[in-house]
Amino acid sequence: MADIYIAAVSASHNVAAKDVWIAEVSTIVETSVPEREILPGLQLLGTVVDKYVFLLTSFFFSPPNSPLPFCNSLSSQVY
């Protein structure tokens, strides 16, 4: 299992109402059920009012011979 990362901000950061926290829980997906992989992190948050789950593939770790021009590390020089 990969590490789970939690980042949180609140009213003290001027991004949420008083007594409201905005949190992000992330990990490296290793199974076909990514939401189950972040469950231990979500359980640490307590009551969750709203939740959005999405997968993000990194352009930085794309194969050097990727057919997609925007993520070809050989042509972009981004590794």
Image (spheres, grey):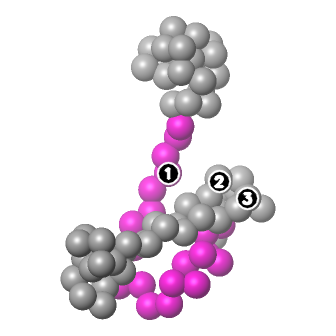
Residue at coordinates 49% horizontally, 46% vertically from top-left?
56
Q: Which residue sits at x=25%, y=70%?
A: 15
Q: Earlier in the sequence, mark 3 or mark 2?
A: 3
Residue 8, image x and y in percent?
44, 72
At label 2, the amino acid type is Val
Task: Kindly identify the amino acid type of the residue bearing the numbered disc 3.
Answer: Ala
> In this rendering, which labeled residue sits more in front, label 3 or label 2?
3
Instruction: Give the residue type that dot 1 points to.
Output: Leu
The span picked out in magenta is 37-58
Res. 35 in view = no
Whether tag 3 and tag 2 are in contact, CB under 8 A, the answer is: yes
- Horizontally, residue 36 falls left or right of residue 53, namely right
Q: Residues within 10 Å of mark 3 (few under 14, many from 20)?
A: few
User: Which one is earlier in the sequence, the residue at label 1 or at label 3?
Assistant: 3
How far apart marks 3 and 2 lie (CA) works out to 8 Å
Residue 71 appears at what percent x and percent y? 49, 22
- Residue position for label 2: 29
Residue 48, position in %: x, y? 42, 84
Asked whether disc 2 touches disc 1, contact meaning CB atoms under 8 Å apart, the reply is yes
Q: Which residue is mark 1?
A: 55
Identify the image quadrant of the N terminus.
bottom right
Quick one: SS at disc 2?
A: loop
Q: Nearer the viewer, residue 35 or 77?
A: 77
Q: What is the spatial separation of the Cα atoms under label 2 and label 1, in whole angstroms?
A: 9 Å
